[in-house]
Amino acid sequence: MIHYFKGLTRWYTSPLAATLAGLILIISNACTPLPTPSLFDAQVLDSTGTAVDAPALPGDATADTVTAQQQTGISMTGTWVLATDWSSCVVLGDAMEQRAHTLTRVTMIQEGRHLHEKRQICFLQSTPVLGQTTIFPQAALDSVGVIAVESSILGADTHLSYAGGMEVQLWGLQLTDPLAESMPSSATDPRIIDADHDGLPGVTFHLGKACDMQVVQRSLAVVDAQLGIDGKFSGGAVRSNEMYVVAGSNGLCTSTFAVHANDAANHATMVRVDAKGLNLDTDGNGEVDCAEVVAAKDQIVQFLDADDARCTN
Ligand SMILES: [Ca+2]
Ligand SMILES: [Ca+2]
């Protein structure tokens, strides 16, 4: 059922991508991902097999890193990519799945079991619904900026779990307390900002060539993943999205659909991409930037296409 609201709309638990009826069909690349190099540094084991005095690698030779390795058998300090594959169900008669595919660059500094992260959204695409595709311009992605997240690493050696902290994305929105404050309910709310600098309030998305919309959105997400034999952390994730449509160029872009999160069908993968991992620094400047991440998308993860059965079971 389509719910029409005059003017402004608030959506709960509708993934960013799923906030609109159509998103970009990901053309799956059939290439097999390259093997992931080990993300482990060399370890020194004592007679009981416990990692001791694990040597720090060049560039990580700090006391904190040594401590981190001694505690967990790994130094995660470096650059990673978090690939998240979100499921939501759009209810238009039958429920249809819509998936949102995200690549986020994550730089980490490990301090014991604590991971101090800076995250940057490099890539966001979603699968279409009824042939309609929402386009998220680069300016909108950039407007979210760098997100600080505090995470943890649990376990040790090959039995490691990644407990991601809360990631708070604010799109076109400035909140003093992102968790406590309510979303705007008026286009004149002073917390709505022209974050993508196009002269219009909020951030602008395109629904194919049909219309444009100005939106603000708050997205909260948490990832939980375990280390696999492929050297990647794989697991699940949950999130909550709230969107407010400030304006649209026509009625199609101000209408909304009933959308609900389908968190059981989410997937999260975290892959090391610096020289100790996939080594995606193709221009050799010592850093892996978003362009290098996006160029290696199919090496990092294979996103799923939508399958409506995930919304009917
Ligand atoms: Ca704007
Ligand atoms: Ca580079």
Image (cartoon, grey):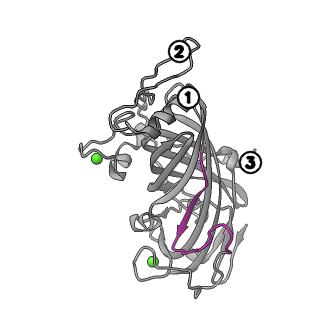
Residue occupied by mark 1: 228
Mark 2 Cα-neighbour bin, 10 Å: few <14, some 14–19, many ≥20: few
Callout 1 touching callout 2 (CB < 8 Å): no
- Looking at the image, is mark 1 or mark 2 nearer the viewer? 2
Which type of secondary structure does the marked residue at label 1 adopt? loop
Q: Which residues are magenta?
A: 164-182
Q: Nearer the viewer, residue 16 or 2?
A: 16
Q: Is residue 65 left or right of residue 112?
A: left
Q: Disc 2 marks which amino acid?
A: Asp
Q: Would you say residue 301 is visible in this rendering?
A: no
In the picture of the structure, the residue carrying the numbered disc 3 is 312
In the depicted view, which residue is nearer to us: 224 or 115?
115
**Is residue 173 in the magenta section?**
yes
Whichever of labels 3 and 2 marks the residue nearer the N terminus, that label is: 2
What SS does tag 3 mark?
loop
Helix, strand or loop under label 2? loop
Q: Is mark 2 within 8 Å of ligand 2?
A: no
Q: Residue furthest bottom?
A: 188
Give neighbour class at mark 3: few <14, some 14-19, many 20+ (Cα, 10 Å).
Answer: few
- Residue 66, picture quadrant: top left
Quadrant where the N terminus lies? bottom right
Report the amino acid beneath label 1: Gly
Measure how far apart labels 1 and 2 are at the Cα level: 24 Å
* First along the sequence among labels 1 and 3: 1
What residue is disc 2 on? 46
295 in the magenta segment: no
Q: Nearer the viewer, mark 3 or mark 2?
A: 2
